[in-house]
Image (spheres, rainbow, N blue to C red):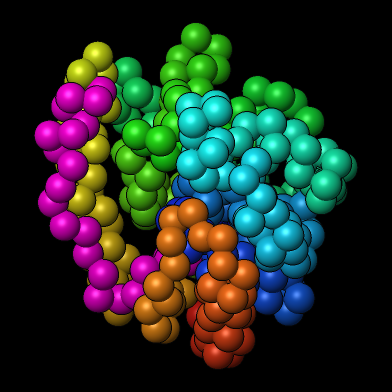
């Protein structure tokens, strides 16, 4: 039996996902493949490397550091998430990724990125995080529009995968897994509202297909959320989503909020563990 794991993004809401995945690792819930979007990819990579607690640890330690992410980084570098601090110092020195474990792991890992020329999603297999190009795809997946410079890789430019495919449920269905686990970072009733079209057309006037993708994002998101709910009701997939609303900023520096979001993920995972095991066995 092959299990696919889909991880939605959502900036610091991704701490919910980190809590879910830490429980998975502790309780021996193994997936054969992960498809992660934005924070889902950046935090989800720790499942493949088997590093329980790493996401919470470095966010608690560095979220308040102006070099991590925020206005200071945006003014200094053009990126709200500081490339050198996040993808060099933390990854290699301050709280290193277990590169060997990541590469050795049999879990297939895909990061979703948005091609800014075509406005469409690409699903990039990530196998070796010591490969600078592979790490750049991860960075691109989490590069939020308007507050990030496009990431250029092999002559193409990319931004946040959530622009084109926030919840890649149709993609993971086509990949042919026997069981699918979905981790969302919004409550059941959440749907996106229309907005941002005018700003996108002006800001990304050189990339009309990207601007259109941003304009259409709410429709695509809501269609995917509806499909997830339908498949869940039919017991074809198993879904974790926040059991309550936690107010957390996209760039959160409050340690208590960070812990609250992470702990909600842990608690929801533990509460749903028996149901998940029954689904996987069934």
Point out residue 23 in the picture as x, y percentages from the top left corner: 68, 76
> What residue is at 44 percent from the left and 32 percent from the top?
148
> What residue is at 70 percent from the left and 37 percent from the top?
85
> What residue is at 50 percent from the left and 23 percent from the top?
151
Majority secondary structure of the magenta segment? loop
The vertical placement of 218 against 157, above or below, is below
Quarter residue 265 falls in? bottom right
Q: Is residue 192 visible?
A: yes
* In this rendering, position of residue 181 left or right of residue 103: left
* Residue 116 or residue 100, whichever sits in front: 116
Counting labels gives: 0
Point out residue 166 in the picture as x, y percentages from the top left corner: 36, 49
**Magenta segment range?**
182-204
* In this rendering, position of residue 104 left or right of residue 74: right
Quarter of the image with the N terminus in it? bottom right
The vertical placement of 255 against 210, above or below, is below
> What residue is at 47 percent from the left and 63 percent from the top?
13
Quarter residue 92 falls in? top right
* Residue 242 or residue 234, whichever sits in front: 242
* Residue 37 or residue 104, whichever sits in front: 37
Point out residue 19 in the picture as x, y percentages from the top left corner: 62, 72
Point out residue 158 in the picture as x, y percentages from the top left corner: 44, 26
């Amino acid at each position: 039996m092959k299990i696919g794991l889909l991880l939605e993004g959502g900036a610091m809401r991704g701490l919910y996902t980190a809590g879910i995945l830490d429980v998975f690792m502790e309780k021996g819930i193994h997936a054969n493949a992960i498809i992660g979007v934005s924070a889902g990819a950046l935090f989800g990579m720790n499942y493949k490397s088997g590093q329980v607690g790493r996401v919470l640890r470095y966010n608690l330690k560095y979220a308040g550091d102006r070099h991590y992410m925020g206005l200071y980084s945006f003014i200094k570098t053009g990126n709200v998430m500081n490339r050198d601090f996040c993808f060099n110092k933390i990854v290699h020195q301050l709280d290193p990724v277990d590169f060997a474990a990541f590469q050795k792991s049999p879990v297939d890992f895909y990061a979703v990125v948005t091609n800014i020329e075509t406005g469409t999603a690409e699903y990039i297999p990530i196998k070796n995080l010591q490969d600078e190009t592979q790490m750049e795809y991860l960075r691109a997946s989490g590069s939020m529009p308007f507050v990030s410079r496009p990431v250029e890789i092999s002559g193409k430019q990319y931004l946040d995968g959530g622009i084109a495919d926030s919840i890649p449920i149709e993609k993971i269905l086509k990949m042919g897994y026997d069981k699918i686990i979905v981790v969302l970072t919004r409550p059941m009733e959440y749907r996106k509202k229309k907005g941002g079209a005018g700003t996108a057309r002006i800001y990304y006037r050189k990339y009309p297909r990207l601007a259109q993708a941003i304009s259409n994002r709410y429709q695509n998101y809501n269609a995917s959320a509806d499909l997830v709910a339908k498949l869940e009701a039919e017991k074809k997939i198993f879904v974790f989503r926040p059991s309550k609303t936690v107010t957390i900023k996209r760039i959160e520096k409050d340690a208590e909020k960070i812990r609250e979001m992470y702990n909600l993920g842990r608690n929801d995972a533990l509460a749903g563990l028996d149901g998940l095991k029954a689904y996987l066995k069934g």
